[in-house]
Amino acid sequence: MIGQLTGLVGQVENERCIIDVNGVGYVVSASTRTLSVLPRPPEVARVLVETVVREDAIQLFGFATSEERDWFRLLTTVQGVGAKVALAILSVGSAGELLLGINAGDKTTFTRAAGVGPRLAERILTELRNKVAKMPGGGTAAPAMGIVSGPSVENDALLALAGLGFRRAEAWPVLSRVLTENENATLDLAIRLSLKELAR
């Protein structure tokens, strides 16, 4: 079983990336949150991994924090929530948001994710209501090496741009330039200026 990969960040796509470990490229599926905070290729990153072995394939799922990995494991215990749906949920909601959504019985927290309808959302709420007490409340997990974490204009702007459909590989250079030229830019300004550049 593979529990962690440390290597060069290769190609980053919509739902996965390649981590090059000593010349071997591992294909790692991940949420848009994790993909958006990976260092620029070909910088080194450490990604926490959940290995899923099936009859026809061995799949690797990567996470920026142990907290996100714990939520992935919890979500996939729900009938009807496979790995792909779990990543979709983690792409639209942080650990804290998922926890609040479950405690509040709010189905929309989950129906925002691709592949989750009202019925499945209801099942998630029902099955996880008594399990989330053991889950971290959000943000206390130690970040993996080489991955940006915590509140910052750069991190939040990257997440916002990823949510708008821009790949990290194209958004990061633009955002980096915007923040360099506008040292004290607010999140709103950083996003607006980046969008203006990306629209060209």
Image (cartoon, rainbow, N blue to C red):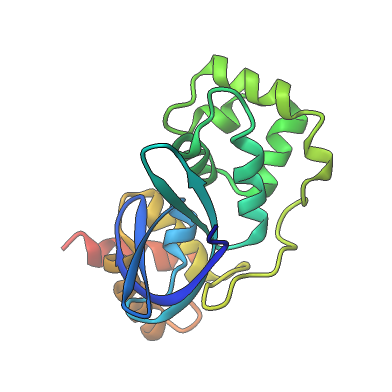
The number of numbered discs placed on residues in the rendered structure image is 0
Q: Residue at x 79, y 34 (%)?
A: 131
The image shows residue 41, relative to residue 170, as above or below, that is below
Image x and y of residue 199, in percent? 20, 59
Image x and y of residue 135, in percent? 77, 46
Q: Is residue 112 visible?
A: yes
Q: Quadrant of residue 196?
A: bottom left
Image x and y of residue 195, in percent? 30, 61
Looking at the rendered image, the quarter that the C terminus falls into is: bottom left
Residue farthest toward the front in the current orientation of the protein:
55
Looking at the rendered image, the quarter that the N terminus falls into is: bottom right
Horizontally, residue 48 falls left or right of residue 185, namely right
Nearer-the-camera pick, 127 or 180: 127
Image x and y of residue 71, in percent? 65, 45
The image shows residue 170, relative to residue 118, as above or below, that is below
Q: Residue at x 47, y 76 (%)?
A: 45
